[in-house]
Amino acid sequence: MKALGRHILAEIYDCDPNVLNDRDLIEEIMVKAALEAGAEVREVAFHKFSPQGVSGVVVISESHLTVHTWPELGYAAVDVFTCGDKVNPWDACNYIAERFEAKHMTASEVKRGVFEKPVKVVNF
């Protein structure tokens, strides 16, 4: 069965804590990850927490990329969700792990929008 989208859930460990605590750098990495994967960036929103940590989202035409960091643990939770066939979410995920200077990553892919029965498409 063909899925509407692919959703990568990544656990990224042993990252550079300075990278994980730099809001501007995290934003740059996430936007470049989307572009590296071939996505079209639409909106960007990032927030720096006190005393540490960054959360953010890159909205793409094909869905989204999100990140939540724990610099004190060297850990980042990353989701990359893409729809269609032109964007490979693994390209974005691997780019992020590399730029976070991760020593370890575990990730799984979830197929989204897999219908067991035929559906009727309604145009609004």
Image (tube, rainbow, N blue to C red):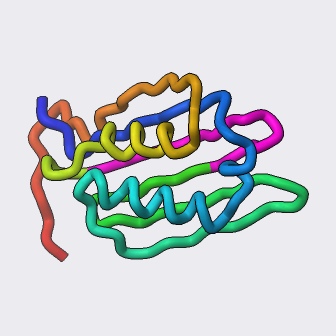
* Count of numbered circles on the image: 0
Q: Which of the 4 image quadrants contains residue 6?
A: top left
Q: Position of residue 110 (x, y in %)?
A: 36, 31
Quadrant of the rendering where the C terminus is positioned: bottom left
Q: Position of residue 52 (x, y in %)?
A: 83, 54
Q: Residue at x 10, y 54 (%)?
A: 120
The magenta stretch spans residue 17: no
Quadrant of the rendering where the N terminus is positioned: top left
Q: Residue at x 67, y 64 (%)?
A: 23
Q: Is residue 52 left or right of residue 108?
A: right
Q: Relative to the observer, which residue lies in front, 104 or 11?
A: 104
Q: Relative to the observer, which residue lies in front, 101 or 6?
A: 101
Instruction: Decide whether the magenta segment is chiefly helix, strand or loop.
Output: strand
Q: Residue at x 41, y 46 (%)?
A: 80
The stretch in magenta equals 68-82
Q: Relative to the observer, which residue lies in front, 3 or 31?
A: 31
Q: Position of residue 10 (x, y in %)?
A: 50, 33
Q: Position of residue 21 (x, y in %)?
A: 74, 54
Q: Residue at x 35, y 57 (%)?
A: 34
Q: Is residue 110 left or right of residue 116?
A: right
The magenta stretch spans residue 70: yes
